Image (tube, rainbow, N blue to C red):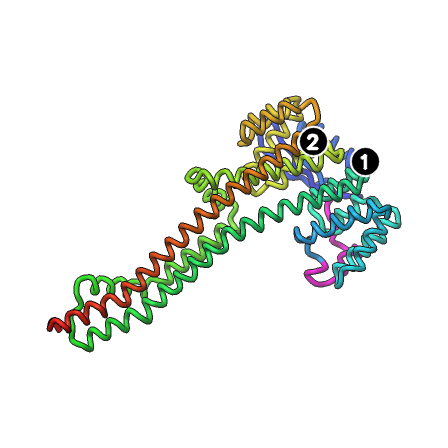
Amino acid sequence: MPTFTLTVYDPNTRSTSQQTRSGKEPEVREAVEKKGLTVLAIQETTETSSEPTRLFAGKEGTRPLKRTELVIFCRSMALMVRAGNSVSEAMSFYAKSIKGPLGGRFMDMARKLAGGDSFYNVFSKSGLFDSICCGVISAGEKGGNLAVSFKMLGDRYARLQFFISKTRRAISIPVGITVFMGALFIASQFLIVPMVEKMLHDSHIEPDMFSAYVFKMANIVRHTWFIGVGGIIAFGFMIIFSIPFRNTIVYFLMNTFTSFRKVVMGMRQATFLSTVRVLYGNGVDLLESLGTAAQALQKTPMGAELKRAAADYRSGMALSEALRRNTSCDEKLIHMVRMAEDKDLVAQLENIEEMYNDETVDYMDRLSQTVNLLSYAFASILIGIVFIGSYLPITMMAARMMTGGG
């Protein structure tokens, strides 16, 4: 008997929770809704026992697909299915192009599809695909437009990968410069400044006020550098592994820098729009599409906002009004959704998504330029400190010796 993991909303406490239930999907939904709860998302739990797809060892055989791999897979499948191949044939051809355990996983999926198993069961139990991909494939299977479904998924993952790569490039250069210059500064306090201080001492020259201050600061850095470095490393780990801490930092930066807020909100809203568009455009119920979008954004505050909006929409509220009351979406997004709510919502969502993609790229370029400028300014300050602390005492020592001060 299949087991399902459900994300449910309780209108009395206005909170969401997850439940695990066994049975057929319609019966599971009905049992939960009889208790007055709203089902926001439902997914069949992946089996981990003696499933053949789990027999392949190694990380490559068990890990989910990376986004770049998803782009290649979805676009390849779209081309082969559009050319007239069945999904099992297309999967078999694709598996032969993949070496190692991952190719075996795809070949096993092809055999199951050829044996008559449903696309959703095969894709969801493989452990290779996320809930959005499985939902779209299921909708494409029911609607008979799998080629379109694969193409939409490929375009979505490609756009998401583009934004992630652009964000990494915008961050990596300033962070790399800052780390290198910080290491150079600490090294100068250990190697160069003590050597200059020793030269003055050996020459029996009393350091002037500025040089004495430089030597004192270098001594403090030598005894406390590990505290600063440890704090920076701990800060980085907190940002990576603590979602509440990361959201707090992001919230602070969003309130401080307009460009940063535009980039973050643009990416969140574009993710929400693309998820709903791809699912709803392939025949998935709009309520379930909202629940899946909430899952895709569950590590951000917008995830909880979309769950509340989905609950209000299920109670009969218009989608635009539910978004206005429960989410931090822009007014123009809500207005444009309201305009097409009873018409071609999928086309309107695509138009809004394109608008936010273009705006986000523009603001990301501006933010990248600002961050790069600040990193170069910080690097220049550190270079100046290293130069002044290393060579100015020597220059002043030479001047004093020439004037007979030494």
Residue under pointer 2: 346
Task: Compare residues 163 and 232 and report the one nearer the observer.
Answer: 163
For the residues carrying marks 1 and 2, which lies nearer the camera in this image?
A: 2
> Does residue 130 show up magenta in the picture?
no
Q: Position of residue 3 (x, y in %)?
A: 75, 43
Say left or right for 339 vs 378.
right
Q: Position of residue 16 (x, y in %)?
A: 60, 35
User: Is residue 161 visible from the viewing direction of this image?
Assistant: yes
Determine the residue positioned at 71% across, 57% down: 62
**Which residues fall within the magenta stretch?**
44-61
- In the rendered image, which quarter contains the N terminus? top right
Q: Position of residue 387 (x, y in %)?
A: 30, 64
Residue under pointer 1: 143
| Quarter of the view holding residue 187 | bottom left
- In the rendered image, which quarter contains the C terminus? bottom left
Mark 2 residue crowding within 10 angstroms, few (<14) / some (14–19) / many (20+): many
If you read the primary sequence from the N terminus, does the residue marked by circle 1 or circle 2 appear first? 1
Up/down of 36 relative to 366, above or below: above
Determine the residue positioned at 55% across, 38% down: 359
- Amino acid type, residue under disc 2 in the picture: Val
Mark 1 residue crowding within 10 angstroms, few (<14) / some (14–19) / many (20+): few
Q: Label 2, secondary structure: give it.
A: helix
Say left or right for 77 vs 400.
right
Determine the residue positioned at 41% across, 50% down: 373
| Residue 189: assigned label | none
User: Is residue 303 visible from the viewing direction of this image?
Assistant: no
Q: Label 1, secondary structure: give it.
A: helix
